[in-house]
């Protein structure tokens, strides 16, 4: 606000300098091989079998070390570089799924999408090309869009309908953190809700969080959607989510995001997973 502007200006300009530096360095991160993809497994609540994984970006900066995507994704969105990075991650993940597929492992991987990729206008082409070049079963690719993207229904509906026609799985990430009505859910072709970590953290102690989680699970199932909880760190949380009939979980309790070489060790044939059948195919009404 006007009253506090002066108070924060110092911190703000220092932060800006670092932003500018990181944004500059990021331009060379992709070509310099500094970006890599970690995989965090997702588990069936009941069987504890791996049912898929999420691809998460990592930036190993030559001087500053590992930088969190929470820090650099907004900078990449700001500069527009997210489109190039987003294309790279989609292609890389599809190629990886294809390599597993050739070994008889049908493993579903989700990729996070940025709102900027929707605004760019070529997202459907990028996804179609990645699917065709890799020749993967299309339901082995899942796209995670945040609730805030999904809420902007007028802008994203057309693109989501086209993505759905390509045969990929679509899920709503960070579900429950938005502030709009739920009406958008019935209009969008989505298959899965991902309950935000903030509701899982205090699940055991906060009764309203527990009520929200249980309600989201019911909502999802009533709409023929799958539901996954992120940020599961304890056995108690896992048991409670099982009681609530949540389908899948992801979190440090089972595994942190892992580099490919470590993650692949978890994908032995014993863990081989039957990918999603797209039971519901809700084209927009
Ligand atoms: P997200 O998509 O909601 O991903 C979940 C985040 O929670 C990841 O953080 C993951 O490492 C972390 N996490 C998983 N399990 C636990 C747990 O049990 N406890 C706690 N405390 N955290 C857990 P990460 O990898 O730092 O990613 C942060 C965000 O950056 C992601 O949130 C996503 O919004 C964004 N992001 C990551 N990779 C990409 C990408 O390739 N493209 C885009 N557009 N965004 C990405
Ligand atoms: Mg995600
Ligand atoms: Mg999330
Ligand atoms: Mg999140």
Image (cartoon, grey):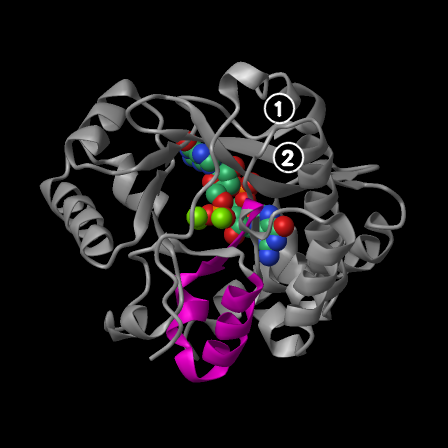
The mark nearer the N terminus, 2 or 1, is 2
Tell me the residue at 47%/33% (across/down).
Answer: 274
Q: Residues within 10 Å of mark 2 (few under 14, many from 20)?
A: many
Q: Residues within 10 Å of mark 1 (few under 14, many from 20)?
A: some
Task: Give the camera-side residue of 250 and 224.
Answer: 224
Q: Main secondary structure of the magenta part?
A: helix
From the Cβ of disc 2, is ligand 1 less than 8 Å away?
A: yes
Residue 141 to residue 260: above or below: below
> Mark 2 and 1 residues: CB-CB less than 8 Å, in contact?
yes
143 within the magenta span: yes
Q: Nearer the viewer, mark 2 or mark 1?
A: 1
Element carrying mark 1 = helix
Describe residue 74's horizontal placement relative to residue 89 as left or right. left
Describe residue 257's horizontal placement relative to residue 236 as left or right. right
Q: Which residues are magenta?
A: 140-166
- Dividing the picture into quadrants, the one containing residue 172 is bottom left
Task: Give the camera-side residue of 132 and 187.
Answer: 132
On the question of residue 71 being in view, the answer is no
Tell me the residue at 69%/28% (across/down).
Answer: 260
Quadrant containing the C terminus in the rendered view = bottom left
Determine the residue located farthest toward the bottom in the rendered image. Answer: 154
- Dividing the picture into quadrants, the one containing residue 238 is top left
Measured as percent of width and height from the top left, residue 120 is found at: 67, 76
Which numbered dot is residue 38? Answer: 2
Quadrant containing the N terminus in the rendered view = bottom left
- Dividing the picture into quadrants, the one containing residue 186 is bottom left
Q: Determine which residue is flagged by label 1.
A: 263
């Amino acid at each position: 606000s006007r009253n506090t502007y002066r108070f924060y200006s110092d911190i703000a300009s220092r932060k800006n300098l670092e932003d500018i530096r990181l944004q500059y360095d990021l331009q060379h991160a992709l070509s310099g091989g500094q970006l890599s993809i970690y995989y965090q497994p997702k588990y069936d609540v009941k069987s504890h079998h791996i049912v898929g994984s999420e691809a998460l970006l990592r930036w190993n900066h030559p001087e500053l070390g590992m930088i969190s995507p929470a820090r650099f994704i907004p900078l990449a969105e700001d500069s527009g570089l997210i489109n190039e990075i987003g294309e790279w991650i989609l292609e890389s993940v599809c190629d990886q799924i294809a390599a597993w597929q050739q070994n008889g492992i049908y493993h579903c991987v989700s990729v996070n999408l940025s709102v900027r990729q929707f605004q760019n206008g070529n997202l459907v082409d990028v996804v179609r090309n990645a699917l065709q070049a890799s020749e993967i079963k299309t339901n082995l690719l899942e796209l995670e869009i945040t609730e805030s993207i999904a809420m902007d229904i007028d802008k994203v509906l057309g693109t989501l309908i086209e993505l759905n026609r390509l045969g990929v799985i679509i899920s709503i990430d960070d579900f429950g953190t938005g502030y709009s009505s739920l009406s958008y859910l019935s209009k969008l072709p989505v298959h899965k809700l991902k309950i935000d970590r903030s509701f899982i953290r205090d699940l055991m102690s906060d009764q309203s969080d527990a009520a929200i989680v249980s309600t989201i699970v019911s909502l999802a199932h009533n709409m023929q959607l799958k539901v996954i909880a992120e940020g599961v760190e304890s056995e108690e949380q896992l048991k409670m989510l099982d009681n609530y009939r949540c389908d899948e979980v992801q979190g440090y309790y089972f595994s942190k995001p892992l580099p490919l070489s470590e993650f692949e060790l978890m994908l032995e044939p014993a863990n081989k997973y039957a990918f999603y059948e797209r039971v519901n195919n809700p084209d927009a009404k």
